[in-house]
Structures are given as C-alpha cells and as structure tokens.
Amino acid sequence: MTQDSTTSSVPTSLVEVAGLEKSFGDQQVLRGIDLTVERGTATALLGPSGSGKTTVLRSLNVLETPDRGCVRIGDAAVDFSALSRDKGERRRAVKALRARSGMVFQAHNLFPHMTVLGNLIEGPTQVQGRTRDEAVADARALLEQVGLTGREDAYPAQLSGGQQQRVGIARALALKPEVLLLDEPTSALDPELVGEVLAVIRDLAAQGWTLLIVTHEVRFARDVADQVLFLDGGVIAERGGPEVLSDPRQERTRRFLARMLEAG
Amino acid sequence: MLPEPSRGRRRCVSVLLLLASLALLLTPVAPVSAASATSASTPSRPVVRVGTEGTYPPFSYIDPKTGDLTGFDIEVIRAVAQKAGWDLTFTKGAFDSLFPALDAGRVDVLADQISINPDRSAHYLFTTPYTYSHGVIVTAADNHDITTLADLKGRTAAQSQTSNWTQVAKDAGADVKYVDGLDQAAALLAQGRVDATVNDNIAVLDYLASSGSKKIKIAGNAGNEVSKQAFAFRKSDVKLRDQANQALAALTKDGTLARISQKYFRSNVTVPNSGNVKVKGSDTGRSSWQVVKDTAWPMLRAMVKGTIPLTIVSFICGLVIALAVALARLSSYRLLTVPSRAYVSIIRGTPLLVQLFIVFYGLPELGVDLPSFVAACLALSLNVGGYAAEIIRAAVLAVPRGQFEAATTIGMDYGQTMRRIVLPQAARIAVPPLSNTLLSLVKDTSLASVVLVLELFREAQVAAAVSTRTMALYCLAALYYWVVCYVISVGQHALERRLGRYTT
C-alpha cells in the first residue's frame, strides 16, 4: 500500500502550509505557520500545551477554519485569506481538501453504535460510494494490519483503549487518504497500552505512509520521525531532522525536552 | 455547536422541507365539502347534523340496554326530521361544547333542551318551543336554609358554564362553580362541596328517580317563570328552522308530540301548564357490577376506535414535527431558529385545551374546517411536537462533539452525519423522555371529547350520566388507561434494550 506517485508530474512536497494564522476570541494561537511534508515521510509536531500544534493539525482538515493562510494537500488547496464568497464553491474546496487526509483523534471518537467493521466501512460505502463487498475486504485487510483480526463484530465499548485506538487508525486508513493526521494518539491511553499503538504507527511509517503526528512521546518521535517541528507560542520555534531532539539549538526546545524526558 | 456550520446548509434545508412535507402528508386532509344542510342545494333529503349531550336523561341519553342514543329530545327531533324530510346524524358533546360546535358549523341544530333567552335569541334561530318546564333549586337533603332563589345569594351553585340555569343562579347572586352536567352537580351536592344547583324540574326528577338518591332533594322553585325549550339553529339557516316549525306544528296537531311526552313524563310538557310530571327514571335497578359489565364493551370500543388511533397518529406526526423543529432550532439560520423557538414557546406556554379549541372551533372562522378526529390529531400532534422537539434537541446536544468531528473527517455532510451518526445515538438518549411524552399523550386524548371525539373517557361520562355509578365507571376508565400505558412502558424497555445493545 505504497503512496508513491506513479504520475510523471514533478515530485513536489505532499503537504504545504503557508502563513497560517488563527485566533480564538482575542487570543492568537497560530501566528504564521509555514511547513511542508514530503510524500512518504513522518513528521512529528511537538511543543508545550497551548503551543498550537493541535490547531495546526485541525486546520489541515478544516475542523478549525484558519483566519489566514494557505493549506495544500496533493492537488487540493484552500486559501483561507481569500475564501470564495460562494458557499457551494467554498464547500466543494473544503470537501476536496478533507478527502485527502485521514484523522486519528486523541479520544478515538469511534461510532459507538456501529461494530468495528461498521466503523471501517462507513466512510468508504457512504461517502466514497464503494461497494460493501469491496469495503469489507479492505477493512479486513486493515484489521489484520493493526492486529485486530477476529474483532470485526465487536462494538467499540467491548474493546480496550489500545484496541479502540487501533480501530481508529484503521478507520482513517480505510478512506485511503494521502496523509494521515494523528492528534496525540496515545495521550488518552493507560501507559501499558501505549506500546501497541505506537507499534502500529511505526509500521505505517515503515510502509511509506505520509504521517503528521502531534505527540508528547519524544523517544518515539526521535525513532520514527523524518522531520521534527517544535511549536511554541503559535510559531515553529525549531525544525529539522530527528537529531533536533538530541541536540536542540534553541534554549526553549532544550528546556521543553528536558521536562518531557524527565516526565516520560 | 456543529464543527462547521456553513457546511451542508442547502442539504439541511432540503431535509427540513422533506420532513415538513412529510408531516403534511401524514396529517389526514379534511374533506372540505362535508355534507352540510346549508350547502345541500338539492331539495331531496338534506342531511341535518344534530348536536346533543347524550348525558342529559331523560332528554338525551344512551339507553343502557341497547347502547343507542335516545330520550325525549331525540325522539322529537326524529319525528321532526320525518315530517320535514331530513336525514339526521347525531354528534354528542359536553353541553359547553354544543354552542361552539353550532357556531363553527360542526352541527346544524341543537336538540338538548335549549332554553330560549334574550341573549341566545339574538344569536340563534329558535323553533317554537316543544318543552315547557320550570327551574328548581336542588340542595343536599339535610339543607334547610335554601328554599327560594333569594336564598342563593352568597352560596355556591354548581352549573354548566353555558346553561340557561347558570344565568338564573348568577342573577340570584350565587357563586357559580362550573361542572359538565347535572350528574356532576348532584355528586358535588351529595358530597357537600356546593350548596345548590339550579336545573330543569324534569331533569332533576329523572335524576332522583334513576339514582334513588336520598342525599339530595328539590328545595324549591327557581322563580315562577316558565322556561321554554326549543331547537336552536344558526341565524343563517332560516329555511331549516321554518321547515322545523312546520313539522312541529303538524306534530302538535296530529298528537305525536303529546304521545312522546306522555311516554316519558305521563303528562304533556309540550304545552304550557302541563300539570304534574312523573318520570320513571331513565335507569334504575342496575347494580354497580351490572353497570360496569354493560359499559365495559362500549368503553373498550371507544378506546380502540378513539383513544388508541388518536394516540398513534398524533405521536407519529408529533415526532416528525419535533424532529424538524429540533433541527431548525439547532441550525445556524435565524430564519429557522426564530420561528422554531416561537413555536416551542407557544405550544409549551398554552394549555392543550385551548389549543384544541382554537384548532376545532377557531379555525373554521378562517375557512379551515377539519372533522373532529382530524382536528384532535392536529392539535395533539402540534402539542407533542413542541415538547418532543426539546427532548430531541437536548438528545442531539448530548451526543459528544467528537462524533460530529469524526463524521466530518470521514467526509460526511450534514444530512449523513445526522442520519447515520448523530440521530441513532440521540435516539437512545431520547427514548425514556419520549416515552413520558407518549404516556402523557395517551391520557391527554381524554381532552379530545371537547372537540366531539368519542373516546374512552367520554364514554365513561356518558355511562355515568345515566347510571350515576360514578366511582365504578371512572375506576374502570382508569383501569383501561393504565393497561394501555403499561403496554407502552413494556415496549419502552424492549426498545431501550435494543438501542443500548452496543453499550457494555
């Protein structure tokens, strides 16, 4: 399930964010974010709470509507500084952008009234118009990948937290997105369940999925990420390869990492 | 708050329109051209609709042996119809709903010992009188303070709101308490809750004979005036009234009226100075048990044909309205939120009884003339809609925000999110409070009798009027309601289990 493009177009970055700004009331949480994510890479977003990293992620699928700035994923782009005045056009643009990403929530947000299989085929059959048989076959393959074969007919409430989050990942993947957005996927889990979820994410990175992860797991980020972005106060304070985490140049990054490693 | 309000608005509107049109479809449409005497242009046998109480023996009551409407007034109007060449249909309702029904064109003539007085003469057309009687004052047997109208000053009197005798009692200075009919007034007297009631001497004599009650007595005459009773028509129905007058004259001449009167009263009350009236009582000698046995089947029939269909139709239509209103209230369009808030506020802020009266007696003034059952369904549906809308709205708001977000990120629009993700979860939350609404509705259908729907409770009242076995009959009615509600609560538990199967 490689995401390598077979088209002959010039390989540019898959995700591109420019000049993103967002305020909640009179509090500005994003003060101009620029970032790019290359196809097939994993990017970790780190930073203290309130730094805006989750807002960045939620701007990519417009769960939050940025005040200004531009988001592009693949060939779908929305310029929030110049949103169309036509509602239909705006809706189509947002829909196209959303269709290119999948989202894994901190609190999994599985549909409690549907079985595991039902959760996985809901998007493909209801939104993408694929046949049920095809969607079920794909869903079974995904469940095998996240280690949940045999739990198709369980309801979310019957699963452990780690299993629920793995179903959440499979549900996002079922739509075959170009990039997977993960919002603190292990923060709500009991410590002993964190490992199984991280292992699944590690697998995805190895298979060449494009990942954008908001996380507090510094060691995991160092192991898996190709790119590390450190946010503080609504701007990207430091960026680079995973080595940034071992040898940060900025003092505030250093302090944050020291705290995180102490706690972790 | 939904994740992205601008999303799917057009879809939202179309869903609402769909629901609204569905609600209209489900509301049974009234036959606009109900057969009415006034509109019948053909000279051959017009259908005349008669309004009567059916609970006022011996004038208008249900014969306990046959279950058919009968009585002095009923026989007279039938004889008139025969002479005039009419076909009759009868509509039974509480006395206080008779004049509104005549005004609204629900019925064409009232046959219920309607006394002629100046007020009524100004608004209605009366025939020549067919009953001459006088008013009597009734008190508890052990009351010796009241013998004349003058003694009523400052005392409490139980009367029907729109009865002629009410005015007599008021003029005498009595403090009037409103009841549905003579049987209720008599019960209040026997219980010592009121001091007196003023009514027609014949009706009172019949009550005393039927009930065998030793607790109340005729204490004296209500003045010396003779009261004249006649059939009442709308002002515009001059032709019908004239036909009735011709028929009454002929019936007087050929002795038919006198014969009917002799049968009921052993004297001729259709002329002034009839002499002593003797009544045998419309119903005597049945035990409470016998009364209950005789009434059980008519009450069951009224439940199956009135109460239950009324409940089912009103609840389904009400839920459709409620869903549309709840979604409108949750929308970000002021054009939808403002009217939906107003609707909920009006429904919850006014009595159901008033809503029923507006729909049934008020709308005909605007040219919307709905049959009884439809009017009752409409009023009850609108009522359920207002209450259930708030339940559904609260249930939707109780679904976690993350569910909306998850649905959004897998690409669902507003309609899909609601239909597939949110409403199924909201349904589970809403079942217990909606069951409460349904149980209330079952019992609220008893109010439908004011718009002339014959339902369970009205049937009990009809039976109680003749037999005076109030306690037994109302307990039987309560038992019927309880059984229906019990079945519903069993259904509620099954539904909760089914909807909650995904929780552990």
Image (spheres, grey):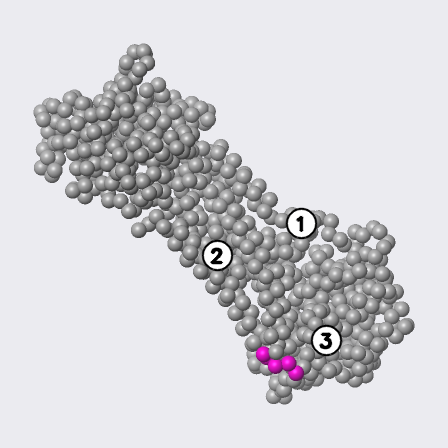
Q: Are marks 1 and 2 on the same chain?
A: yes
Q: Is residue B329 above or below residue B437?
A: above
The mark found on residue A83 in the picture is none
**Which amino acid type is shown beneath numbered disc 2?**
Thr
Q: Specify the subunit that label 1 lies on.
A: B
Hey, which quadrant is residue A13 in on the image?
top left
Extent of the magenta region:
B285-289
Q: Is residue B458 above or below residue B319?
A: below
Which residue carries the number 1 mark? B30
- Please provide percent x and percent y for residue B347: 53, 53
Looking at this view, is B385 or A195 the one in front? Answer: A195
Q: Specify the subunit that label 2 lies on.
A: B
Proximity of marks 3 and 2: CB atoms separated by less than 8 Å: no
Which residue carries the number 2 mark? B437
Q: Specify the subunit that label 3 lies on.
A: B
- Please provide percent x and percent y for residue B412: 40, 33
Looking at this view, is B102 or B30 the one in front? Answer: B30
Q: CA distance from mark 1 to mark 2?
A: 26 Å
Quadrant for the N terminus of chain B in the image: top left
In the visual, does A78 lie left or right of B449? left
| Mark 1: few/some/many CA within 10 Å (<14, 14-19, 20+) | some
In the visual, does B28 lie left or right of B331? right
**Which amino acid type is shown beneath numbered disc 1?**
Ala
SS for dot 2: helix
| Mark 2: few/some/many CA within 10 Å (<14, 14-19, 20+) | some
- Please provide percent x and percent y for residue B88: 77, 61
Proximity of marks 1 and 3: CB atoms separated by less than 8 Å: no
**Which amino acid type is shown beneath numbered disc 3?**
Pro
Q: Residue at x 53, y 60 (%)?
A: B442
Q: Are marks 3 and 2 on the same chain?
A: yes
Which residue carries the number 3 mark? B58
